[in-house]
Every structure is written in structure tokens, then in C-alpha cells.
Amino acid sequence: MLDPTLSPLNLHSIASNHALLTDDRLSEIAAHPMAWPKLVTWANYLLQLPHEDRPSIPVPRPPENFDPSTTPATVTPAAPAEIPQAPLPRTKKNRAPLFILLLALAVAAGVGWTVIPSQSSQPAPTTAPAREEASTPLPEPVPADDPSLTASGAGFTCTARQAVVTCWGQNTYGQLGTGMASEDHYYSFEVDEPVLRLVAGADFACASSATTVTCWGDNRWKQAGDSDIRILPPTTLPALSPIDGLTAGNIHACVLSEDNIVCWGSDYSGQLGSGTQGEQGAGLTEITLPAGQIPQDIYASGFTTCAHTEADLVCWGANDEGRINDTDERILPPTVVHQDASW
């Protein structure tokens, strides 16, 4: 168990030692009181990856002047959910005792036996346990012409068709729409209007109709709704109307309505357009683009958001490793990063 008095720099050093990053250690890092938002998201994301892929994901650096007292309380994530699997076929090792027992019974009953050599590639069929009949169903394959929508988060996936949303996978933060953390791995619910757009962040998701936005799941940074409740069931946000675009980063989301962009969730890396290390959780916030820029569509990834305007690309948020612009600034306000009249 990690010492709760460890500093952010100590946590960064521990997280950088990939040889010691077991699932338990990653869960401890994500739940540590000194963990900053990016480190929490990083640890939860690595829990979904195979061990051999984890060293390729860099550890986020602790922010300057980090104040853990303002960080929303974290929920200790459960171990990554395992996909139910069919019973393993019996091998020769565990089949021998059964064979001997049947042979003994046959001899005792005076029954003659003909031994037929078995093929190792075709093990004897076994009967599935009775509890498998009541197991959670997996989603049906989607036909190629099915007008459904699909979005995936760090450890879960959702689809939507008409007004019905179906999610499956990990549910440590209510990602499936249950409104609570649970061991459920499949859940379906209905929203008020047919879904036209479906997006997912790290541990939350949002669906929009032509006039409303509904979000659910992890809400520690208010990314699913302007509420202090850490896990939200499907909740309608008072977004702008009509809705022309919807996108989600790791712990924030944005909607485009005609010429306006509104974002909500974490502004800790400037995701809400402040240009500074803003609030760790905030409600609906209108984004002010540079003069003359009219947004046509929006895209979010990680801790950064971009708007495609009539001729340019305008981005804001985290600028680590120059992901927005080649400057030393780690957080940028809405900034024109591409100018091309033929865009």
C-alpha cells in the first residue's frame, strides 16, 4: 500500500518504474490523495492495456502548484473486468479420472467397451454449467446497413439505435449508464429522443439528439453533468439548441450549436478554453474563439479540443510536447494552429 503522504513527485517516480506497475499498484496510484487528474486518467487507462504495451505510454508530469485539497475525491477502481469465457475443454490430464471411473462402472455392470482413440485437436465436448444459461448476454452483431452509432471509452463500448442505448464492458464508474459502480457488464436504457450523435470519454459517455445532450458515468470532474455526485445515471444537460456537433475528451466534453461552442468538465489543462490551469470541474462554459472564426465542427482528444472553422483549425487546452503549437506554454487558449484558405 502506497504511503498517503507521498508527494506528487514521489508518485511520478513510482509510476515511471514500469517494472513495478502491477494492476494493484496502478489502482493505488489512481486512488492516491496526491494524484493529479492526468495521473488518475493515465493509471486507469493502463489498467486496460496488456502489460507489454504499458511502457509505451508516458507518465504525465505533475502540474506546478498542484493543490490536492481541491481534487475531487477519487473512487478506487475495481480490477479490470474480465470477459466471460466458455469453460475450457477437458484435457487428457483432467479427463483420465472420469474415464477410469466410467470404465470401472462398466466392468462392474458387465458392459463391453470399444476404446476409440481420441484426437487431441478435437477434445470431447463438455456440458456448460447451468449458471451459464443465466449469464449476461453479449450484444448482437450489428448488420452493415444498421443505422446505429458506436463509441468506446477506456474500458467500455456503447451503441445507440433510435432512442435505445446499449453499453457493455467495465462499469467501475457507471460507464454503462447504471448510475453506480457495479459488477454489471451489460446494460441498456432509453433516452427521451432518437440519438443522432454518440461519444465517449475515458469513463463517461454522452448522446445527443437534435435538441438535447444526455451524459452518464464518471462525474468526478463534472464531465457528465454540473453536479457534485461522482457517478451519474443518464442525465440531460441544458445544452444549446440546435445541436450541430458533439465531442468528448478524457474528462471533458463539448457541443457545437450553430456558431457557438460550449464545453464542460475539467479545465485543469485549459480544456474549457481558459488558457490557464482552471477549475478541476466546471459546468457549461462558452468558448470564445479568435475574432472572425466561425466553427464548423469540433473534435476532442485527451485534454485538448479543436474546432474546424471555415478556413482554419483552432485548438485549445493541453500543449504538452507541442501538441497544439510549438511553444513552451503547457496550456493554450483557443489558438489558430493551421491557416489555409483552401482548407
Image: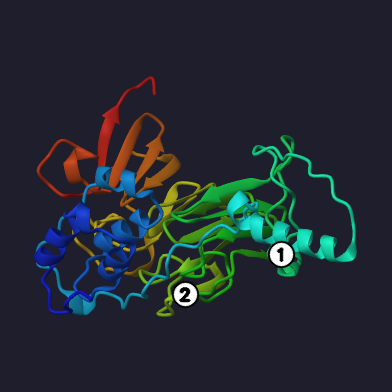
Q: Viewed as shown, does residue 141 lie left or right of 332?
A: right
User: Which residue is at the front of the view, 215 or 17?
Assistant: 17
Crowd tier of the residue under label 2, counting other residues whose Cα lies within 10 Å: few below 14, some 14–19, many 20 or above: many
Q: Which image quadrant for residue 323?
A: top left
Q: Position of residue 119 (x, y in %)?
A: 69, 37
Q: Which residue is under mark 1? A: 132
Crowd tier of the residue under label 1, counting other residues whose Cα lies within 10 Å: few below 14, some 14–19, many 20 or above: few
For the rendered model, the colour scheme is: rainbow
Q: Which image quadrant for residue 107?
A: bottom right
Q: Position of residue 1 (x, y in %)?
A: 23, 76
User: Which residue is at the front of the view, 216 or 120?
Assistant: 120
Q: Position of residue 326 (x, y in %)?
A: 15, 35
- At 35% from the left edge and 22% from the top edge, which residue is drawn? 341
Q: Viewed as shown, does residue 153 lie left or right of 133?
A: left
Q: Does 57 appear above or below 265? A: above
Q: Which residue is under mark 2? A: 231
Do we see residue 86 in this rendering?
Answer: no
Q: Which image quadrant for residue 79?
A: bottom left
User: Which residue is at the front of the view, 151 or 187?
Assistant: 187
Q: Does 159 appear above or below 184? A: above
- Secondary structure state at the residue bearing disc 1: helix
User: Which residue is at the front of the view, 131 or 325?
Assistant: 131
Check disc 1 and give the amino acid type.
Glu
Check disc 2 and give the amino acid type.
Ile
- Secondary structure state at the residue bearing disc 2: strand
Q: Earlier in the sequence, mark 1 or mark 2?
A: 1
